[in-house]
Amino acid sequence: MSDTAFIITIDTEGDDLWGKPREITTRNAEYLPRFQSLCERFRLKPVYLTNYEMAMSDVFVEFARDLMARDAGEIGMHLHAWNSPPLVPLTSDDFHYQPYLIEYPDRVMKEKIKTITRVLEDRFDQKMISHRAGRVGFDGRYAAMLLDEGYRVDCSVTPGINWRGHLGDPGGNGGTDYSAFPCRPYFLSLSDISVPASGGLLEVPITVRACSLHQIAPWVYRIPLLRSVANRLVSPAFNWLSPAESDLKAMLREVRRARAEGVPHVELSLHSSELMPGGSPGFRSTSDIERLYEELQILFENLSTWCRSVTLKEFDARFRESPAQATSSGLWDGGTATIPTRSAPAQGHLDAALPG
């Protein structure tokens, strides 16, 4: 078995937030035990990155306290700025536009981060270490505020993906442009979060990679007709390790690439509401959910044969112990270090699962 880390991250949030509900429900918490059981069958330890409404769900809190007591997973923080207190209006309709936290004034950003951190730590009686930004909107100010609250690891970066076209505030600049960000884990610089630093907040990017055609001819994916042909005959522009973004064939393709390259980690991303029928755009019916679990089982069977399952907290601890080894699959066995690589810039079309 190789010593590549396998990290499962779940944006743990309300039901079907893509529908922009004004009354947010959390019924998907009732569906999480099935997913947890599948993970434990393969001795995998998921990370539930939890936002405000899920932290207020007694069903989820009972579930999460049990898995933490058994050391069967981790609870981290996930922040949706538009419904996480204190509620300070930014747009004419924040529940419709779902603005990014980085679009708010610094004072409001700090208060929102502090408030949800206290809520999570009170509800779960555990220090929060890990984080993913809502709608993966992230910058150096946000990173500095996380450090002030004691966070050690973030997993918001989607290498190669430009979110500028996905607006929050309709008068704003959209999301974060990750086109030239590293694919491998690194301590990020607060002055430029795409640049590795010697310490500080650890970034563990989501696993996503531009396909070979996109790397050679990204313009193909900017022309609708050609993009349709390329998606059908070659590959979508990006292969995600995410069942909402890529089919099983594409995910296994990305897994093979990761194994061949000897990467230090692979990171699966999904949303808790995707585990419930009708909880997300891509999984509307019971048959959709059954298909999802069939694909997850195949994926987990593959990864469990050559990866080591760790939480973000565990990955961070080992990374800091052995920073010279941390960018190779030798992180767990004394392997040789490599320099963090940068992903190929991505300018093509993206049908991404937001919010998250």
Image (tube, grey):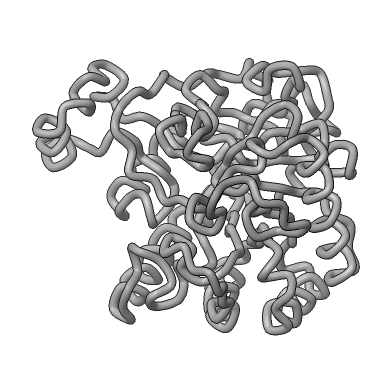
**Observer-nearest residue: 220 or 37?**
220
Q: Is residue 53 left or right of residue 137?
A: right
Q: Is residue 346 above or below residue 132?
A: above
In this view, the residue in front, 173 or 262, is 173
Q: Residue at x 75, y 59 (%)?
A: 85
Q: Is residue 111 left or right of residue 4?
A: right
Q: Nearer the viewer, residue 21 or 79?
A: 21
Q: Is there any visible trace of residue 1 in the rendered image? A: no
The percent position of residue 341, horizontal first and vertical second, equals 55, 18
Residue 279 percent across, percent down from the top left: 43, 72
Residue that appears at 22% across and 19% down? 219
The quadrant where residue 152 appears: top right
Up the image or down, 169 lies above or below 179; here it is: below
Q: Residue at x 41, y 43 (%)?
A: 240
Q: Is residue 322 visible?
A: yes
In-image side of 94 versus 252 (left or right): right
Rendered residue at 55%/74% (across/down)? 23
Left or right, residue 82 beside residue 283: right
x then y, percent, for residue 216: 26, 16
Q: Residue furthest front?
A: 92
| Residue 214: % across, % down | 28, 24
Classify 138 as above or below 54. Answer: above
- Rendered view: 254 above or below 275: above
